[in-house]
Amino acid sequence: MKRVFILGAGASRELKFKISIIDAGYKTIKINDCFEIGPLSSGYFYYISKLQDFLNKVLKISASVKVSDDLMEQIKIYFNLNYNKDISKKELLQEEEISKKINIEKLYIFLEEKIQEKERENDNLLQNKSFRNLCSARFNLIKYIHNSMAYVSYYCISINHMILSKYIIKNGGNIISFNWDILFEEVMITTGKWTPKDGYGINFNDIIYKNEKDEEQEILPKVNSKNLILKPHGSINWYSKDEQMNTQILFIQLNPNLRSGNFGLLGRYEKKDYSSSITPPGIKRESFPEVWDKMKRLLEQADEIIAIGFSFNDNDKYIKEEFDEIKFKKDLEIIIINPDNEKLKTIYKRVFYTDNICTKHKTFSQYCLSL
């Protein structure tokens, strides 16, 4: 049976992490050293702020990811347009219900659309202060997403992703992830059966290691990956040079067997002509055609699709258009893992052209327990 897992934002809705604080590897964590976070979409700024507070209590070094002034200015504009109210940085970071009104993907789309408007309206963009402010805010949002997700990936081990990775290695399956984080890939590397060098389905133009010793010691598994992890919206460990999205570069940030300790290992690549390759949902892109083509082939060959936290929300409208071109198997089986899975049945029937849909579990953790 050919099985495909689709991971949406809901896969990070109920994350429970074990925090590793030993340089030499993992250790057994006491219950009071565990931290719950999520989701990594709405309320993102609040949850990352709480994670930083927790890390600062249990680690010797300071965890710090800051919301820049220009980004905060655009967040205020976005919040006022949507809710006719003001929002302070304190509310953004410390008030959960207020922070949850800001979906980080929708905020990204908002900035992209405003920048595109300026590009259509103005010829001399370099002299346009509003345009420069928007570009600066977008850059700092990407930086915030990149650095905060790096914290999550570096200090936190997602138990759910770990269970799923072991199941896939044992029983087979390919993954389509619409998330920017690398939680799943990190645990896939530790199985020794998957490597990002070929497991992403991309022919990278270059592979860069943060640490030269890691490159010399071949820290990644010496295997050919049997499972693909396709990421149509990009990934925080993919980079482009001079903003050319067709020249993808894989950045190996740390030795996966040596977690925690000195966060300096995870610093951003400093050359100015490299930028993180993540793209916002909601705006149809041709950033990763190689990934989209392979994704369509996987879905056409699939006998079973397990959709975890993938709800076809307002940001995913264009994905339905992409799926219209796919010729799914007539006997395709679909399992929905989502709190609103009953409501999703109708949407899934229209997208996948099948009535063979079941809703076994409401949460990722419930599904993982069943494995």
Image (spheres, rainbow, N blue to C red):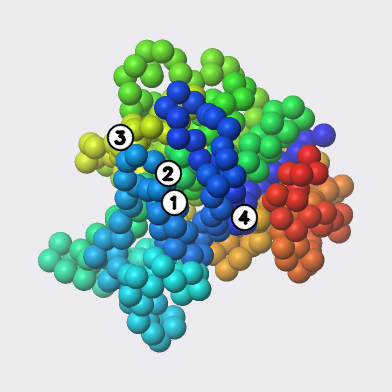
Numbered circle sitting on residue 264: 3
Q: Regarding mark 2 in the picture, which secondary structure is present there?
A: helix
The residue mark sitting in front, 1 or 3, is 1
Q: Are marks 4 and 3 in contact (CB under 8 Å)?
A: no
Q: CA distance from mark 4 to mark 1?
A: 17 Å
The residue positioned 42% from the left and 61% from the top of the image is: 45
Badge 1 is on which residue?
Answer: 54
Badge 2 is on which residue?
Answer: 58
Q: CA distance from mark 2 to mark 4?
A: 22 Å
The residue positioned 51% from the left and 60% from the top of the image is: 41
Q: Residues within 10 Å of mark 2 (few under 14, many from 20)?
A: few
Q: Are marks 4 and 1 in contact (CB under 8 Å)?
A: no
Q: Amino acid at mark 2?
A: Val
Q: Amino acid at mark 4?
A: Glu
Residue furthest left as drawn: 127
Give the mark nearest the N terminus, 4 or 3. Answer: 4
Badge 4 is on which residue?
Answer: 14
**Where 56 falls versus 102 (above or below)?**
above
Q: CA distance from mark 2 to mark 3?
A: 17 Å
